[in-house]
Image (cartoon, helix red, strand yellow):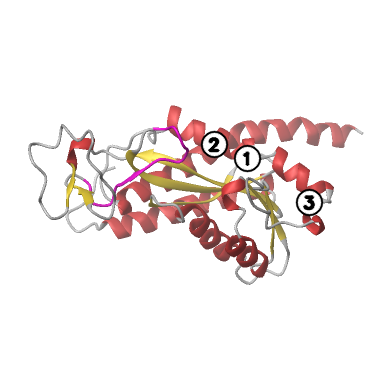
Amino acid sequence: MVFGERTTIGAVGEVAQKFFAEVNLRARKFMSDEHFTVDGTLIQAWASQKSFRAKDGSDDGDGTDFRGQKRSNKTHESTTDADARLYKKSYGKESKLSYLGHALVENRNGLIAAAMVTTADGFAERDAALLMLHERQKDRSRRITLGADKAYDTKDFVRTASALNVTPHVTKNEKGRRSNLDRRTTRHAGYAISLSRRWLVEKSFGWLKQTGPLRQVKLRGLEKVDWLFVFSCAAHNLLRLPRLIAQRQPARLREQCA
């Protein structure tokens, strides 16, 4: 994409969301409007570990030897990409300068219904999910379901999602604590079905990183990474449409011949 001198990143981000919305308008008949899954994925920033320097300038050397040093996002930041954060999603993994990409996926065909990028921290996945749900549920009275992993099993998330007319079908987190879900939710067959569809969002993330450009972005700054992520999610849906249309045509022919 080539930008004119007066083109702002904010304007490009708005174009990305409009393009994404237009693609989803065309894909509407293939998308569930009741059942969804949400998750986040790490997007490696275009910044090296040695760029992660002390904010007060107290670092010695060129930043290549940081073993044994205590480094955190409170005391350090990347001199290459100030919006990138040192983060890891799971224990035992290496912390990397990253962003978090978030996707709300419908459960019928695994098309992406909403997408956004945030800085990486321990609250971003739940906060982004609630923002996307709030936008989706505007002026809607129909209750929807939301599948998610155990990181979303928190009191605040479950309570806020319920207030948005969303039934949270999250994996129960009972490691040393009680889950925030009760039998009123988990006893229904729909709960197990929602959990069984969680692979759809992982499949989307796999495409975005293996085929798309999001394993490690070559852009810097939250707004630029966000529009790249949204455009890539639109491309994911757009490329899925021909096959979904082709699958629907034989079914129509059978109905006409019946």
Decide: few, some or many residues near mark 3? Use Cα within 10 Å; few <14, some 14-19, many ≥20: some
Residue on which the image places disc 1: 110
Circle number at residue 141: none
In this view, the mark in front (3 or 2): 3
Circle number at residue 204: 2
Indicate the position of residue 132 as horizontal and vertical percent values.
Answer: 53, 59
Q: Quadrant of the N terminus?
A: top left
Label 3 or label 1, whichever comes before in sequence order = 1
Query: Does residue 105 appear in this view?
Result: no
Label 2 or label 1, whichever comes before in sequence order = 1
Rendered position, 119 above or below 212: below
Say if the magenta span includes residue 82. Answer: yes
* Marks 3/1: CA–CA distance: 23 Å
Say if the magenta span includes residue 146. Answer: no
Q: Are marks 3 and 2 in contact (CB under 8 Å)?
A: no
Circle number at residue 186: 3
Residue pictured at 47% horizontal, 38% vertical: 90
Q: Which residues are magenta?
A: 81-93
Label 3 or label 2, whichever comes before in sequence order = 3
Decide: few, some or many residues near mark 1? Use Cα within 10 Å; few <14, some 14-19, many ≥20: many
Query: Which element carries disc 2, helix, strand or loop?
Result: helix
Q: Nearer the viewer, residue 96 or 116?
A: 96
